Image (tube, rainbow, N blue to C red):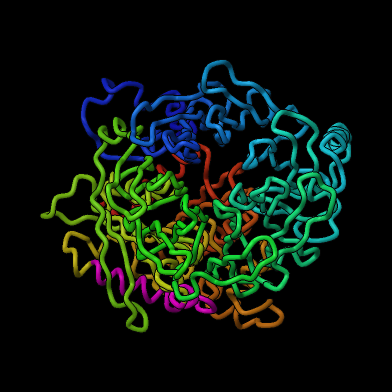
Amino acid sequence: MRRALLVACLLAWVPFASSAATPGPRPFDVRDLIAFDRLSEPGVSPDGRQVVFTVSALDLAANKRRSDLWVVGADGSGLRPLTRHADNDTSGTWSPDGKTVYFLSTRSSSSQVWKLPLEGGEAQQLTALPLDVGSFVLSPDGKWLALSMEVFPGSTPEETRKRLDETAAGKVTGKVYDQLFFRHWDTWADGRRKHIFVMPASGGTPVDVMKDMDADAPSKPFGGTSEYTFTPDSRAIVFGARNAGREEAWSTNFDLFVAPTDGSAAPRNLTPANPAWDAHPAFSPDGRTLAYTAMKRPGYEADRFSIVLRAWPEGTERVLTESWDRSAGDLAWSADGKTLFTTSDDLGNHALFAIDVATGKVRTVVGKGHVVSPQVSGNRVVYLLDTLRGPAELYSARTDGTDTKRITGINDERLAAVRLGEPTQFTFAGANGDTVYAWVVKPADFDPTKKYPVAMLIHGGPQGSFGDQFHYRWNPQTYAGRGYVALMIDFHGSTGYGQAFTDAINGDWGGKPLEDLKLGLAAALEKYPWMDGDRVAALGGSYGGYMVNWIAGQMPDRFKALVTHAGNLDERFAYFATEELWFPEWEHGGTPWENPEGFTKHNPIDYVKNWKTPTLVIHGAKDFRVVETGGFATFTALQRRGIPSRFLYFPDENHWVLKPANSILWHDTVLDWLDQWTKAD
C-alpha cells in the first residue's frame, strides 16, 4: 500500500515545470532521469543546412512518453519544434528537394505516413491503411515509399485487418502452434509477419514485395530502416531477412534480398553463400557499390560484423575491414563515396569511425562517449552523443574529427538543476593477466575524506558493455545521486576490446567474468580509498542477473546485498523456456541433450545451498527472453533458505522496465534495498 501511494503521488508531480521550481542543484535521481527529453532519428536535409530529429518528452500523468519532430540548423541556429501534437510524430525524412518532411504520426488513431511542407501549410495524411505502418523509407527520386506492415503472408492489409477483427469479435481464445516462435521477446505470435510494401509517394495502393515470404523485414523485435533501402534507380528494394523456416528459432542466418518495387518478381537472395548474419545495406552515392555488414559464424549473434563492398548490381565482393578488430554498426557514405562511417564499441566507449573505401584504413572521428546515428553533411558529420555526464544532444564535426560543435542543448536547463557524479575510467590485470577496463562514478556529493558504499553494476548481454553512456535503465548516476560509488567492469565477454576478448566468455559464463569482477573490485578498492570495501552490493540484469545468482553461491560472504533482475537460476531449464535458441546453443556449446555439461558447468541452481546474502529479485511477466518462472524460483529458493529477500514483480513489463512510473518504483525499491543493507548501523 505504501508503494502504491508513493507512485500515485509521483504521478501527480511533473518535475521541472519551470526553472523557478528548482532553486538549486540537487543530487540526481530517477525522477530526473525519466524527465530528460530524448533525442533520436536525426536526418540531414539534402542541402546540408538543417537537421530534423525526434524529441520524446515525458508525460508522467499518462505514464508514457510523447514524441514531436524538431529542426535545427546544422550550425546550431534556429532550433525549433517542427510539430506539436497530442499524438506521436516520429521518423522525419526529407524529400529530395528539401521542401517537405515525411513522418510517421498516430494522429489518426493509427500509425500512418504524413507529410509537412516546410514553406507553409498543415501536415497532410498520406496513407490511411487498415494496419499500422511500422517504419518507412523514401526512394532516392522521391517518387516511392517503402513501408513495413504486419500481415498474414499472402494476404493484403485489408484481408489481414478483416481476419484480425473477426478473431477479436469471436469467443475462441485458444491458439494453435505448429512451430517456433510461438512467442518472441514480449509478444505471442499470431501468424503475422512484418513485410515491406511499396507505394507511390503521392498516394496509391501498396504492393507487398515479400508477398509469399514467411519472414520478417525489418526483423523483430527491434529492426528498423537500417535493414532496408531502395536501389539507386528507385526500381528495387534491398532488405535483410531471416528466411529460415522451421529453423528460425535457432538460426542467425539473415540474408540480403532484392525485390522489384512493383512486386513483379519474387525476392532474390543476394548472399546465399554466407550462412551467418548479413545486414545494414547502404548504397554509395554513385550507386555503383553496395556496402553491408556480415558475420562469419552461424548461430553466434555476437560475432564480429565486417564491412563488405559489392559492385552493383552483379559484381565482385571484397571485405573492407578484415583487419579491423571491431564490429561495425549502421553505415553512412561520404558525399564523394570515398569513405564509410560507422560506429562501434571501443574501449568503454561507442565511437565513430571513418574507413577509407580504397584501402580499408580506419581512423577515429569521435573516440569518447556514446555516438549513434551518424549522418554525413558535405565535409561534416552530424551525430548524437551522450556520455555518463548527460543525455544525448546533436553534434557535428568535420569528417576528419576536428572542429567539433554541439548544435543542440535541449536538456541543459535540466542538467543545471542536478548534481552528477564524476566518472573515471581505469584498467587492471584481469583473468589470464589480460587488461580489463572499468568505470567508476563518484557520489554526487563527493568528499575525498569520507568512505562511500559501492554499487557494482554488472552488464547484460553478456556480450555488451557498461561504457561512457547515459543509460535510461542502468544509469550509474542514479546510484551516485544516492551516495554510492558506482563501479562498472567490462569483464571478459564485453564488446569493444577485440573479438577474442568477446569470445572469451563462450562456454565460460561463470569463469573468467567472475574472476574479472573479483579482481576489478579489489583493484578499485586499492586505487580509490574512499570506496568502502565493507559495504559493497552487486546488481545486474539479464546475464548480469545470472551473474548475481552465480555470485550468491560462489561468494556468499563478500556482498552486503544483491539485486538480480531477469536472471536465470537454472541454465538447463532456461534453454527450454526461452525463445531464441541460437543464443544458449552457442553460449553453452550445443543443446542440453548434446552437451549437458555445458549447461551445468556454471549453473547457479547447484549452489543454492551456499546462499546467505540478502537479495532483491525483480522480474517482468512479459519477459520471454528470461521467463518469469526464473524470478519465481529464485525468490522461492531465498525464502525457503530463510534469507532476507524481496520480490518486485511487473505484470506489464518485459525484459526491460519501460513505463515511467514503473521505472520510478524499480529505482526506489532497488535503492531502498541497498540502503537497508549497506547504510544501516
Q: 486 or 142: nearer the eye?
A: 142
| Magenta region, main secondary structure | helix
Question: Hey, which residue is sitting farthest top in the picture?
Answer: 121
- Specify whether 149 is left or right of 537: right
Q: Can residue 523 be found in the magenta stretch?
A: yes
Q: Position of residue 222 (x, y in %)?
A: 61, 50
> Up-down: is 367 above or below 582?
above
Q: Position of residue 213 (x, y in %)?
A: 81, 55
* Residue sitting at x 28%, y 48%: 480
Q: 59 or 49: nearer the eye?
A: 49
Please say whether residue 552 is visible from this viewpoint: no
Q: Position of residue 362 (x, y in %)?
A: 40, 66
Q: Position of residue 364 (x, y in %)?
A: 35, 61
Question: Hey, which residue is sitting farthest left in the picture?
Answer: 449
Q: Report the span colored magenta.
A: 500-524
* Residue sitting at x 52%, y 38%: 659
> Up-down: is 635 above or below 225?
below
Q: Can residue 571 be found in the magenta stretch?
A: no
